[in-house]
Image (cartoon, rainbow, N blue to C red):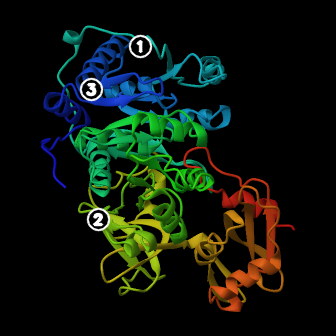
Amino acid sequence: MSWDIPEASSYWGLIRSRAELTPDAPMLIEPSGRRTSFVEYAVMAERLAAALYGQGIRAGSWVTWQFPTGRAAALLIGALARLAAVQNPIIHLYREREVSTVLRQSGSSFFIVPQHIGDHDSAEMACRLIADMAGAPRLLVLDEEALPQGDIGSLPAVQAGEHDVRWVFYTSGTTADPKGAMHADLSVISAGRGLAQSYALTPADVGALAFPIAHVGGAMYLAELLISGASALLMQRFVQDEAVALFRWLDVTACGGSTAHYQTLVNAQALQPQTRLMPSLRVLGGGGAPKPPELYYRAKRELGVSICHTYGMTECPCVTIAPVDSDDQQLAYTDGVAQPDVELRIVDRDGMTVRNGVEGEIRIRGPGIFKGYADPTLNAAAFDEEGFFCTGDLGVLRDDRRLSLTGRIKDVIVRKGENISARELEDILSAHPTVGAVAVVGLPDAERGERVCAVVELAGGMADFSFQQMTDHLAEAGLMRQKFPEQLEIVERMPRNETLNKILKNELRERLGGA
């Protein structure tokens, strides 16, 4: 896939290039139907930049902001890019504990919020948090529907290099304290280009940004639109019936999100098998959580679409791409192929590269990854002696160069000295019609070291899933009995994070560890 847009060395340069190329084409679509063209976006973002410049924000200023997915947040991203500030977005669902942690760690000079986020008084919370904070940031409260505008003529020329740090995204902190991953414009733009290639986007496509825009995927998704010329529906929340109705009304062709988004849309279609609910939809894409192969085939059967599931993380938002023209086997059973500016290797416990087909830790380096952590003391343990980032993820590289994720190092359950892959069990169990969601964790066991526990959230309308049903299903799949779980727990709802609905296994381990 190629596009007419020239290469841009900065995020603002990308905005300007697209505005010149297709000025009147729609870029942002809101649930109300209001549309913002590429040139309108560029002009409005620059006027907002001028207003923020008047408040003292300069090139290199560290700016933390917390906005929900919407036009205001998208414009703020563009405005801060115009100023060449260092922007540190915070997920809009975070509250006192998380926001306070990020503000103290980042040492930002400015904190920008709306007056309210839904029913939550975000301005009041921000005032309270910074009241007793040493070196507190200056608080700016913006009206989402009436963003301030300044004189564009007052702005200096853009001063941003493609390798300069311009973004700080904090990890979710699901297993440890959040870490601030620092990015240059280059890595964010590269990730957007990779996703646009995966989905083969064109200006005729209508996407859907259906997750928090403050996630690293938000800036990446906007870059994807700027590169391809496609437009996107901005969704502050992703609710099944609302999403289906909006997708039908606005002829959405490509939805970005994660496994939970795929599952929601497949389930909606399964309730009305005689009617194609979203006839314009052609591709689902995303990452952030494991994608069972059976879910891919369900999407093909019931929705008539492909899932292009890629592999990424806060430190490298797009490690792999999954071209939509790949065959079903590649899309169902792998997580794509490394994109050109990411060098990927699989290593054993000693750090030695393994041959294709052998599981090991995934390590990456190159211009497509982050520049290091905001806390420099974390970098020594994060990179090996050759400069590869140690992801902590396990995977297998196939002969066709496709990468198959097999789990996390922490997700390998060691029972009686034998390694058991949680991901393997999850993929098999997720194919059972009674299972809505599943997580397999290792729990402390005096006799075995660890015991294998399957935690299941039932599919809608299902009453029960017994231990015998589980073992019968695993046996039918041909799994060796030595890998069968000793424990099954049924939960009403899995604990999940607020960004991509990823299951929080650490909470399950804490909850069930003494059971």
Residue mark closest to the camera, 2 vs 3: 2
Mark 1 sits on what residue? 147
Query: In the rendering, at what x and y percent does residue 467 appear?
Result: 82, 77
Distance in Å between CA atoms under marks 1 and 3: 16 Å
Amino acid identity at mark 2? Asp
Residue mark closest to the camera, 1 vs 3: 1
> Tag 3 or tag 1, which sits nearer the N-term?
3
| Closer to us: 296 or 161 | 296
> On the image, which quarter does residue 328 sit in?
bottom left
Amino acid identity at mark 3? Arg
Mark 2 sits on what residue? 325
Q: Is residue 276 above or below residue 445?
A: above
Amino acid identity at mark 1? Leu
Secondary element under disc 2, as helix, strand or loop, is loop
Q: Is residue 278 above or below residue 46?
A: below
Q: Residue furthest right?
A: 515
